[in-house]
Image: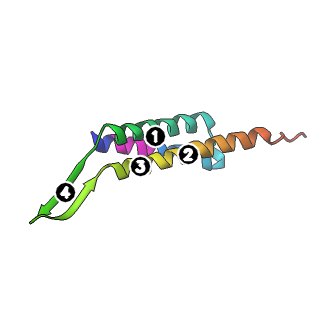
Amino acid sequence: MVVILWLFSFAAAVFGLRWSIIPETRRFGAALIASSLAIASSYVGLSWLHFDASKTINGHVEWSFNSKWFFLTSLLLGAASLGLALWHNRKSAKTPLPTA
């Protein structure tokens, strides 16, 4: 469940970034929805769904794994995607249309 939620949030953040960065595919609505879904699902992953695993040998931790770092990455990518989408939308609203 944790992996599926993380993959969903990461994919939403990447699609939101793609739709807000690449000029040919600038879709403000889609980027806004994708980045909002990435932020919301990352928040759920950070708040309620945790996966912690570690291996201890003779009281010494050999390795540990915590899923919060994956969701934190998706949260930051989603926030960057939302910021870029809003910035591009604001910038394009101020640009006058060319007249022929």
Callout 2 secondary element: helix
Whether the residues at callouts 3 and 2 have beta carbons within 8 Å, the answer is no
Type of residue at label 3? Leu
Residue under pointer 1? 38
Residue 81, disc: 2
Callout 4 secondary element: strand
Residue under pointer 3? 72
Type of residue at label 1? Ala
Q: Residues within 10 Å of mark 1 (few under 14, many from 20)?
A: many
Q: Quadrant of the C terminus?
A: top right
Mark 2 or 1, nearer chain start: 1
Q: Is residue 31 above or below residue 53?
A: above
Question: Quarter of the image holding residue 98?
Answer: top right
Between disc 3 and disc 2, the foreground one is 3
Residue stretch in magenta: 5-12
The x, y position of residue 36, in whole percent, is: 51, 36
Callout 1 secondary element: helix
* Real-space CA distance between mark 4 and mark 3, rounded to the nearest whole angstrom: 20 Å
User: Could you tell me if residue 76 is visible in this image?
Assistant: yes
Type of residue at label 4? Ser
Residue under pointer 4? 54
Type of residue at label 2? Ser
* Real-space CA distance between mark 2 and mark 1, rounded to the nearest whole angstrom: 9 Å
Identify the residue at the far left of this view: 58
The x, y position of residue 76, in whole percent, is: 48, 49
The x, y position of residue 5, in whole percent, is: 34, 40
Mark 4 or 1, nearer chain start: 1
